[in-house]
Amino acid sequence: MCLRKTMLTSHVGWGFAPRVSHVEWSLPTRLFLISLLVVLFVIPGAVSAADQADQPDQQDKFYKIGVLAKRGPDRCLEKWRPTADYLSRQIPGCSFTIVPLAFGQVAPAVKDGGIDFLLANSSIYVEMEILYGARRIATLKNLRLGKPVTIFGGVIFTTADRNDINSLDDIRGKTFMAVDEKSFGGWRTAWREFKFQDIDPYKDFADLSFGGTHDAVVYAIRDGRADAGSVRTDTLERMAAEGKIDISDFHFIHKHKGDHSEYKGGLYSGDTFEDYNFIHSTRLYLEWPIALLKHIPDSLAEKVALSLLNMPSGSPYTRAARCAGWTIPHNYQVVRDCLKELKVGPYKDYGKITFSGVISQYWPWLITITALGVCMATAIIFILALNRKMAATQNKLKHEINEHKRAENALQKSEKRYRSLI
């Protein structure tokens, strides 16, 4: 390297200015130093930024949405994974994933905190609300013939060639397959109709079995493995649209045509039933809600609810879910009424008089009555003791009076005898 120095001096005032050394680097040296600075500072910063860009979700909080896989886990993921992706995009810092759940897996997942949100049928939601404090934040809007609907029910059906089964009463003594004992549209809604007709499926059917999924029940009836069966509304229409069945192969029992007047007081009345175009054999109830578990803060609940309510109809997310989006959470009292009538889930002891039930329901009155009883018993004992004491005092006084009379008589006799002697 070549180094050249130039010495500069100047006079300032009365003295000499200090010498200033001016260093001038050669061109190769300057290039070397610039390259060294780039290697030491610029490249590491760029690499760090690239690493952060490659891992953008390291700081995200992950949340699990448990979904009832009524048609199996693969169909569940295909249908609802886009919704989880939508929420992940809409809510910064949060990443959502779908967890398919079988009927028997829902309660343990909620109880153990294995999920953060739950999308399940209306009766399962009611159970989770009562048992574990789940809270609904939106209600699903289903889609039928281009129209949004927020109600659903059940379908009771057999094959088209079964001319011996035309009514609910005709199923007595036959084999029957439903989806699951916890399936609302696939069993409980149908069970309520049988009960309304004084039919006990557990006693009056030759056999009652459960297929596990809606598709399995449809295939079982089609293949003759059961005489009749039940699934939720829209199942048969969707399977037919997917090319899996020919809907004309089936015959529908107790089919409604918008007239539900016989079910006064037990039917949700928020929609026009004449416009409900899904085949149904039962009363209609509110669609599935999405709920959060009690450990989820309100701040996140508000963001998720707002994102779902703003999900555009006709978007890739709603098309995948075959729905029209979401609406405000509705009142599920009609579902509770159904569970009470069937005495299932949290209402299995509904109407029964048990000792523990009486204690838990009437304990304030029982405590009051017990306290009054103790007070009355204490007062009675006190009064009896006082009466006893008064009686003893009276007896003593009578005895003293008698003794006094005897003494007085004796004195009078003695006085008479003395006088007679004088």
Image (cartoon, rainbow, N blue to C red):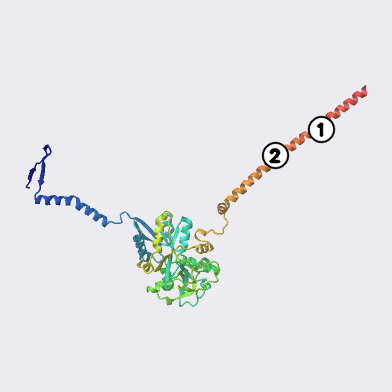
Query: What secondary structure is marked by label 2?
Result: helix
CA gap between label 2 and label 1 equals 26 Å
x, y (%) of residue 260? Answer: 52, 71
Residue 244 visible at all: no
Instruction: Work out whether residue 18 or residue 365 is closer to the camera in this orientation and state it.
Output: 18
Residue shown at 75% from the left, 38% from the top:
391
Q: Which residue is mark 1?
A: 402
Instruction: Say what amino acid the circle numbered 2 marks.
Output: Ala
Location of residue 382 with respect to 325 vertically, above or below: above
Q: Residue furthest front?
A: 13
x, y (%) of residue 321? Answer: 38, 67
Instruction: Work out whether residue 43 or residue 292 is closer to the camera in this orientation and state it.
Output: 43
Q: Indicate the quadrant where residue 220 lies.
A: bottom left
Location of residue 378 with respect to 214 vertically, above or below: above
Residue shown at 61% from the left, 48% from the top:
368
x, y (%) of residue 315? Answer: 36, 68
Number of numbered discs visible in the structure rendering = 2
Residue shown at 68% from the left, 41% from the top:
381
Q: Which residue is mark 2?
A: 385
Instruction: Work out whether residue 262 or residue 252 is closer to the camera in this orientation and state it.
Output: 262
Q: Mark 2 Cα within 10 Å, few/some/many (few <14, many 20+)?
A: few
Location of residue 279 with respect to 422 vertically, above or below: below
Q: Mark 1 Cα within 10 Å, few/some/many (few <14, many 20+)?
A: few
Q: Quadrant of the C terminus?
A: top right
Residue shown at 40% from the left, 72% from the top:
239
x, y (%) of residue 161? Answer: 46, 78
Q: Residue furthest top?
A: 422
Instruction: Say what amino acid the circle numbered 1 marks.
Output: Asn
| Side of 26 where 319 appears, left or right | right
| Side of 345 where 22 appears, left or right | left
Q: Indicate the quadrant where residue 377 lies.
A: top right
